[in-house]
Image (cartoon, rainbow, N blue to C red):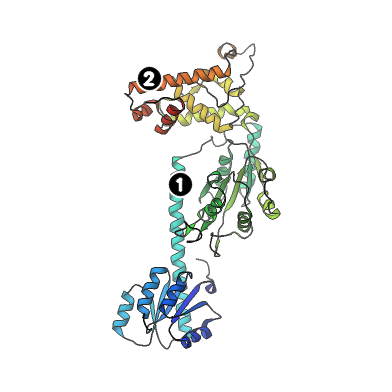
Amino acid sequence: MEELAFQTFPILVVDDEEDNLDAFRFAFRKSFQISYALGGQAALDLLDRLDAAVIISDQRMPKMNGIEFLKRAKERRPDAFGILLTAYADLPVLVEAINSGGVDRYVQKPWDSKELSAILRQGIKSFATIRENRRLREQLHQYAGYLEREQRDPIDYGELAGESEAMVRVRTRIDEVAVTASPVLIEGEPGCEQEIVARAIHVGSAREDHPFVRVTCAAFRGEALERELFGWRRGAFPTAFDDRAGRLELADRGTIYLDAPDPPDPSLQARLLRLLTESTVERVGSTDAHPVDVRLVLSLTQPIERAWSSVEILPELLARLDVFSIAVPPLRERRADVIALAEHFLRKYGRRNARAATALSSEAKAILQGYDFPGNTRELENVIERAAILARGDVILPDHLAFQTRSHVVPAARPSSPVVSAAPTDVAPQALSSRLEDIERRELLSALDRCAGNKAEVARSLGIQRTTLYYRLKRLGIDS
């Protein structure tokens, strides 16, 4: 643990006599941050808003003695270090104090300022250790849950497959920035390999063994994104029932990837600027700064000045975010990579489903290379997944390919190419799409008939997830 700044930890002193409180003021006001309360009830009221690291109470107080007070104080502030001041070496009282669960240390009066000062530091260290251990357990728990979600929902675009000049440039840029700690801005159309680029930066850096935390910013609107990134203090807003670490604390010593965030409001801008300049975060509703060591990677669908043109961005923040940028080209500008990616996806789904197709016919390859893929790599993966389901043999044919738009480019025929006779150019794109839907509908109806309507069995026989089956049944209007 880093060297503690003892003056930053609140200490609460409780006594029913003002003179005794004045003695504490005189002895410790320069060394510690001390609050005072006359009597047990006033102290309990103060603890509702004071996160005390150490609580010192006199034993002999009217209405509520020190042991009873410290026991009730621990119910409010369980991490606090409780010290009981007593003028009597009464063994039964001391046994009761230790067994109460509220007293961690007792000091006999009259106290010695040097000895009590050392005990206060010991109490603060105990409090800080408890809080740090809780933070680490929380981080581990949240990251374990995060990894579990990632395992269930992997994103795999082929680890930047392809040898086109554009992708060679992207890999070169990744190698250049990975060894640094600088923030990175990734620009690319929706469906490009922005996240794969971000992961490649993380894996290529000294942070590889630490968390890579993805934040899908579209899921958090307005203040929700600020809370998710920076966490919150209990009571910061109506549904903040407990303290929670944010994603930035979760990503400590690693990388945080922000996927397509909306233009940030002034509050979030100020917090991001402080993160980039001071490497600290403050949870919403708190003024306590938590140091973090995290690399920020941000992806946008266009240059940052245009993407965030609807709000006024702090010039300092803009300058720090735009230190190093990587532009991921759309798939239509690197058609040479299409087949490499398509074959990667075939291998991927072949591992999941032993009955899936394993190869592309030359005609199917020609159609894939001639299509613009407005949905980029994500659309290509969807096309291959669907084709692998529809193909009943080992090879994907043109009839198995379906695209998300109603028009696509079929490559022009070349005299020496065998593709001319196999890739029909006289079929309207809409008719082809309808034919593919008919094929899929017949296959699904046939499978439902074979399995007597048992959807779980249908999904297993087709080698697809049950949720995928439900989606396709609903899209095709099959009510069974």
The percent position of residue 180, horizontal first and vertical second, equals 62, 51
Secondary structure found at label 1: helix
Which residue is at the front of the view, 453 or 208? 453
The percent position of residue 417, horizontal first and vertical second, equals 61, 13
- Would you place residue 179 above or below residue 93 in this image? above
**First reached walking from the N terminus: tag 2 or tag 1:** 1
Secondary structure found at label 2: helix
The percent position of residue 246, horizontal first and vertical second, equals 51, 55
Please state which of the two labelled residues, at mark 2 or mark 1, is closer to the viewer.
2
Q: Tell me the crowding category of disc 1: few under 14, some 14 to 19, or many 20 or more residues within 10 angstroms, Cα based.
A: some
Q: Is residue 162 visible?
A: yes
What residue occupies the far right of the structure in this picture?
315
Q: Is residue 103 left or right of residue 233?
A: left
Which residue is at the front of the view, 177 or 309? 309
Q: Tell me the crowding category of disc 2: few under 14, some 14 to 19, or many 20 or more residues within 10 angstroms, Cα based.
A: some
The label number, if any, that marks residue 476 in the structure image: none
Q: At label 2, which amino acid type do we have?
A: Ser
The percent position of residue 252, horizontal first and vertical second, equals 53, 55
What residue occupies the far left of the structure in this picture?
92
Which residue is at the front of the view, 76 or 163? 76
Q: Is residue 397 visible?
A: no
CA gap, disc 2 and disc 1? 38 Å
Which residue, given by chain and number where applicable, does mark 1 sit on? 147
Q: How many marks?
A: 2
Q: Quadrant of residue 266?
A: bottom right
Q: At label 1, which amino acid type do we have?
A: Leu
Which residue, given by chain and number where applicable, does mark 2 sit on? 446
